[in-house]
Image (cartoon, rainbow, N blue to C red):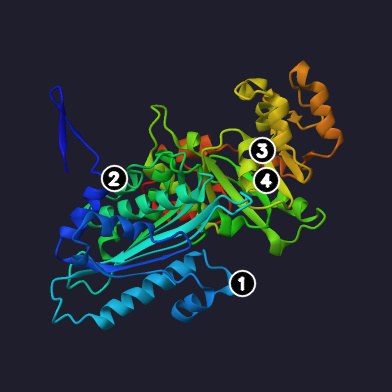
Amino acid sequence: MEITLKGDAQIESIPSLKDKALRINLNENIYGTFAEIGAGQETVRHFFRAGGASGTIAKAMSAYDKSFSDAIYGTEKENRYVTEDRLKKMLSHEVMLIENRLSRDEYPNKMFFSYANTVATIDFAKRFKGHGWVGIRYQIDANQEEYNEITLHVRFKETDARLQQETLGKLGTNLIYGAYYKYNQPKKLLRYLYDHIDKDQLEIDTINFSGPDFKDVDNRLMSLQLLKNGMTDAVMFAPDGNNVLPARVLYKKNILAFRGSFRPVTKVNIDMYEKSYNMFLQENKVTKEKTQVIFEITLSNLRASGGEIDEQDFMDRARLLCSLGQTVLISNFQEYYKLVEYFNLYTKNRMGLSMGINNLIDIFDEKYYRHLSGGILEAFGKLFNKDLKIYLYPMLNENKTMTTSEDLKVHPRMKELYKYFKFNGKLVDIKNYEPEILNIFSRKVLKMISNAEPGWEEMLPEGVSDIIKGQKLFGYEA
């Protein structure tokens, strides 16, 4: 790698794509195959042009015809080819061919790899910008029986198919180079995926590391890095704790979302969830089978007072919510309308937001929308689409009275706007709440846990305290 000097400091310069490909090609022990479907053979092109490719490339192929592709990798459910399952099949098949066709007697020191992608670039009408799955399955040691694997999902932002193809080729080259030369620094590997690529060209919204050399890598923390690095605006975890593609979870679903700190989950959180969920299911065309519940935490909520993100605190919240069987979204959407816009990428069905009445006050505060040319009216046009409702949990005041949507005070300029949405049924009070738990707050519970004060267990839903104690979350010490 080249080093440039500036003053007394050394600054690492970014290797060119040619240099990266050439370094791989000149490593006599790296040897494998390229299988690219849907966007040309853009990655392998860099290795062919760099020189010395015969020492690296065992095979390069593209099976564009569906019948040919099915014959090689098998058929797909619903005839969909740009999926994680398809990518996994491609990687497995190509690695199997390498192992079967190349004798270890002839190639004793070769570290085999298979790089693959399955991609759909922007359509002719430019309605769908395109997306794809990219991955590599590879060895770091020739005697390694279990392969390492890195897979990721990308969404293209460019509006020209040729430019998208070129960007994909750059990404693939960066991935292969990082897999071999930065595998022991996965956070750096992530950042280097964008070498020679601008953030407005490509979004990486899901990534997973697996294999012997990544046994200590927590993929949830790697997804958090995607957010911190500005590579995506939202990442999602399934109840089993694994990263999951948001599009797969949200596609054509009715969505009910809860935003909170969940630090930890309290009886109030669960009561709000259960009551609003039952109300949401009463809506027209909403069924359990087609409804997805999302527990969302914003990136700003994860930041400590110094602006840094406490990764342990993040993991504690993620583990707790996943242990409760919930799907978790970590987002960079401070304003609710951005969250709704994000959901609208994947579904046009009904949506619900469940929140405390105090959060509604912020929604009707104009200062949050000064960056929009249309101000609060533009934001509300995006937020209150035809099929969205907000379910409001009451607030207990210091004088023991309750605040609901009926007596909420908003700024005088917002009164008529507030009445409009209230009258049209967009703002709905949660009626059958549990009044005796309204004085429970997460911050109070967290303080009690940290100070080893007794009684915090009673403020949490059944079983939550056992999870906190068993996994030693939120600083709990026996």
Q: Nearer the viewer, mark 2 or mark 3?
A: 2
Pick whichever, 394 or 245, lies toward us: 245
Q: Nearer the viewer, mark 4 or mark 2?
A: 2
Badge number at residue 113: none
N-term-proximal mark, 4 vs 3: 4
Amino acid found under the numbered disc labelled 3: Leu
User: Residues under labels 1 and 2: Cα distance?
Assistant: 37 Å
Pick whichever, 219 or 193, lies toward us: 193
Q: Residue furthest right?
A: 423
User: Residues under labels 2 and 3: Cα distance?
Assistant: 45 Å
Q: Is residue 32 above or below residue 420?
A: below
Amino acid found under the numbered disc labelled 1: Glu
Check disc 2 and report its element: helix, strand or loop. helix
Residue found 58% across the figure and 48% down from its top = 295
Amino acid found under the numbered disc labelled 2: Lys
Can you identify the residue that label 2 sits on? 188
Badge number at residue 438: 3
Question: 10 Å neighbourhood of mark 3: few (<14), some, or many (≥20)?
Answer: some
Q: Quadrant of the N terminus?
A: top left
